[in-house]
Amino acid sequence: MAAGTELRVAVAGLGAIGFEIAKRLDAGIPGLWLTAVSARDREGAARRVAGFSQPVPVMAVEELPDVADVVVECAPKAAFAQILEPAIAAGRIVMPLSVGALLDRMDLVERARETGARIIVPTGALLGLDAVRAAAEGTIATATIVTRKPPRGLAGAPYLDQHGIDVGAITVPTKIFDGSARDGARGFPANVNVAAALSLAGIGPDRTRLEIWADPTVTRNTHTIVVDADSARLTMTIENIPSENPRTGRITALSVIAALRGLVAPLKVGT
Ligand SMILES: NC(=O)C1=CN([C@@H]2O[C@H](COP(=O)(O)OP(=O)(O)OC[C@H]3O[C@@H](n4cnc5c(N)ncnc54)[C@H](OP(=O)(O)O)[C@@H]3O)[C@@H](O)[C@H]2O)C=CC1
Ligand SMILES: O=C([O-])CC(=O)C(=O)O
């Protein structure tokens, strides 16, 4: 890519995912330029980026579309609309990580069609969405995801409170949810974005089935997808090493970096 034609990237949310993305962009990726970051605690964020090789401003999320071609959302679900709406209104590329939140805001896809914005959902903590998207060009009969996490990787989910489940007391693998990806994303908004992403790649949030297990025998966030289609049967498992946030796999930030690279690299591999 010629000098001065880099894609400007802003990172909204500077936690387990966002800080890793920002660090890697600052370290230098051809064709990509980190132009701003946002966080809830702006002073704290300024301290975190103070050691970067290039100065990067900490801005309000609403200001990011002014300085970026791509806005990466890696904040809690509660900040989703505040980040996506202005970026989509400005016709930017938006990469959401809080994918569960998108299921209840599919109107934003229509809005993106009007403004020329693009919403690109990275594979994130999952795998194989290339194959699922390919299968969806034919006919998929069923799509299921089984998620197993160490109990502490599920703590704090509203579904647990609503159903009186104390994951801290679980000592054997226990299925705590069995239902649609849509209901799972609502009950576990910070835990099963992967199920939401699978549903968007395949047959939608109401037909995609999700099981969630609190499993004290695993140390990794483990997701197994089974998709039955008229072109192939896919069975895939990923075992994610948790990041500093036990709910979030380390690979998630790397998936975003790979997706960003795919926007500018002369060679892109995978669907
Ligand atoms: N799609 C996928 O595969 C995956 C998605 N996720 C999702 O990605 C999102 C980020 O995860 P993770 O990095 O682990 O979360 P963290 O809790 O580690 O970080 C969240 C960040 O968001 C910032 N933040 C909070 N509120 C706002 C706001 N109003 N405006 C701007 N920034 C804000 C926080 O700021 P501060 O530092 O000041 O507190 C913090 O930096 C979550 O929704 C998570 O569920 C996670 C894993 C996989
Ligand atoms: O889907 C999510 O939100 C996070 C997740 O399971 C993981 O990182 O393995």
Image (tube, rainbow, N blue to C red):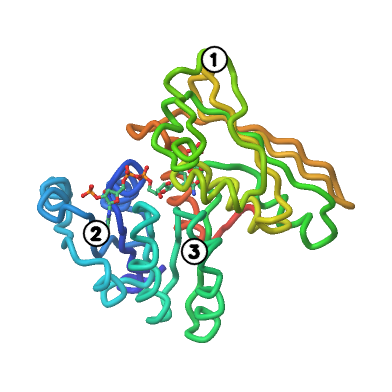
Corner quadrant of residue 190: top left
Q: Earlier in the sequence, mark 2 or mark 1?
A: 2
Q: Give x and y (percent) for residue 181.
A: 63, 49
Location of mark 2 (residue)? 37
Q: From the viewer's perspective, is residue 87 above or below residue 59?
A: below
Location of mark 1 (residue)? 217
Q: Gap in Å between the C-alphas at discs 2 and 1? A: 37 Å
Point 46% across, 33% down: residue: 154
- Front residue of 120/86: it is 86
Q: Quick one: label 2, few (<14), some, or many (20+) residues within 10 Å?
A: many
- Front residue of 239/130: it is 239
Q: Nearer the viewer, mark 2 or mark 1?
A: 1
For residue 263, the mark is 3
Q: Amino acid at mark 1?
A: Thr
Total tally of numbered discs in the picture: 3
> Is residue 169 toward the left or the right of residue 197 in the image?
left
Corner quadrant of residue 223: top right
**Quarter of the C terminus within the rendering:** bottom right
> Is residue 189 toward the left or the right of residue 63 in the image?
right
Q: Gap in Å between the C-alphas at discs 2 and 3? A: 20 Å
Q: Amino acid at mark 2?
A: Val
> Is residue 4 toward the left or the right of residue 104 in the image?
left
Secondary structure at badge 1 equals loop
Q: Nearer the viewer, mark 1 or mark 3?
A: 1
Secondary structure at badge 3 equals helix
Point 45% across, 59% down: residue: 96
Q: Amino acid at mark 3?
A: Leu
Q: Give x and y (percent) for residue 266.
A: 53, 62
Q: Gap in Å between the C-alphas at discs 1 and 3? A: 39 Å
